[in-house]
Amino acid sequence: MEKWEIVIIGGGIAGVTFGYLAQKEGFKTLLLEKKGKLLDSASGVAGAFLFPKVGLDTPYTRFINQGILEGLEFWEKLGVGVEKSGVLILPRDEKDRVKFAKYRTQITLPFEEREGGFFFPDGGVVSVEGVRKVMERELNWQGKEEATQLEETPQGWIINGKYLANKVILAEGAEGNFLPQYLQIYPVWGERIGLKTDFSPPYHLHKQVSISTNRNGIVKIGATHKRNCFQCKENWEEVEELLEKARKIAPITGEVVDIKGGFRASSRDYWAVVGEVIDLKRSLEFDPQLLKGQPPRKGVIYRKNLYILNGMGARGFSNSVITGKYLLQLIKGQISPDPHLSPLRHFIRYVRKFYPKG
Ligand SMILES: Cc1cc2nc3c(=O)[nH]c(=O)nc-3n(C[C@H](O)[C@H](O)[C@H](O)COP(=O)(O)OP(=O)(O)OC[C@H]3O[C@@H](n4cnc5c(N)ncnc54)[C@H](O)[C@@H]3O)c2cc1C
């Protein structure tokens, strides 16, 4: 049996970023990916735009924008290829314009007002190919290895009967085998395109859709969001939708040379879900208070050393560094769980909704 300190299940942006950070901290880490290469699901189709969030100064806005700063710095240092030319974020309509006026005093990142919107120097696009190249070289990883069995033993977690791990990280994205039911992570379809064009903006643009700067004659435009579209495939209607929205930003013409689509793993409230997995059955037995639809009095029972790293939604590239660092600190016992990221709040909501009040 191969012995590892950490085994990560899933080689999307969440899994590879955490894997890299953990390996650098000295953990003996193995990543298992069911496909033949890394970043081949949602992460492989992403526009990989790292654009700040414009909004009220809430914990969520702060988390996203801190993630953008840490992400840009990390990917630049790693040399994966980052187009950090800044981004101009424009209001989508009159209503949005009014909101933008309120947001002006709430923004905590450096910005300047331009063309009716906000220009952020901290806006960039990461090269997915670049990330894949570095991660495939740097990580201990096993492709074409789907984790189908996960067994808890006194020695540790056994995966597929052949890997023994002290800790397991479930970074399976939208299509996982081990997604705890109570997390209610659901797939949201999205499409983005590559357009061969002469259009060459000085910085990235965003208004409903994002447009990248021109790289080798191509700009990326993304993305659509389709909930409850479980059978969705790449289609021309969404290409038209993207082009129409892009033309509301600038008179852009060209030839569509690339259409990519995939499923984002979304949580109910957009926050990523990171932390130790809760044992539903044992927790309900341990603290019957939960069955009354109330927060636990005695606490919940965790599946020790089994962690979830998921629910990245539309911002996996923006969030992967901040969530990866957070998970590492959590594992090392350096911090307590952040209630926004912890699976606990999903667990309580799920029990309240789906279990009879006693
Ligand atoms: C069209 C589109 C555009 C997007 N644009 C952006 C953007 O501009 N900026 C941004 O930040 N985000 C963007 N996103 C969102 C981003 O792509 C996702 O948030 C991110 O890819 C999620 O990463 P992940 O690692 O959680 O999941 P995934 O990328 O889905 O990775 C999960 C991996 O786990 C593997 N796996 C699953 N189960 C198992 C198992 N049991 N055993 C082994 N392997 C397993 C899968 O094969 C997969 O490779 C976009 C998404 C889409 C669809």
Image (spheres, helix red, strand yellow):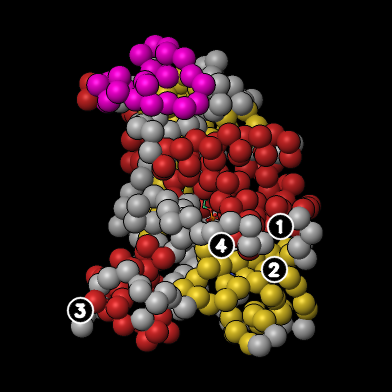
Instruction: Tell me where the magenta segment starts and ends, as one range.
Output: 96-118
Residue where numbered disc 1 is placed: 22
**Rendering coords of residue 325 (x, y %):** 62, 51
In the image, residue 161 lies in the stretch drawn in magenta: no
The disc, 3 or 1, on the residue closer to the chain's N-terminal end is: 1
For the C terminus, the image quarter is bottom left
Where disc 3 sits, the SS reads loop
Between marks 3 and 1 in the image, the one whose residue lies nearer the viewer:
3
The amino acid type of the residue labelled 1 equals Ala
**Rendering coords of residue 164 (x, y %):** 71, 79
Where disc 1 sits, the SS reads helix
Between marks 4 and 3 in the image, the one whose residue lies nearer the viewer:
3
Q: Residue at x 69, y 68 (%)?
A: 6
Position of 85 with respect to 114 (left or right) is: right
Position of 122 with respect to 158 (left or right) is: left
Residue where numbered disc 3 is placed: 357
Find out whether the residues at labels 1 and 2 contact each other: C-beta distance under 8 Å: yes
Residue where numbered disc 4 is placed: 171
Q: Residue at x 39, y 72 (%)?
A: 181
For the N terminus, the image quarter is bottom right
Mark 1 → mark 2, Cα distance in angstroms: 8 Å
**Rendering coords of residue 233 (x, y %):** 41, 53
Evaluate whether residue 257 shows in this view: no
The amino acid type of the residue labelled 3 equals Lys
Find out whether the residues at labels 3 and 2 contact each other: C-beta distance under 8 Å: no
The disc, 3 or 2, on the residue closer to the chain's N-terminal end is: 2
Residue where numbered disc 2 is placed: 6
Mark 4 → mark 3, Cα distance in angstroms: 33 Å
The disc, 4 or 1, on the residue closer to the chain's N-terminal end is: 1
Evaluate whether residue 82 shows in this view: yes
Mark 3 → mark 1, Cα distance in angstroms: 42 Å
Between marks 4 and 1 in the image, the one whose residue lies nearer the viewer:
1
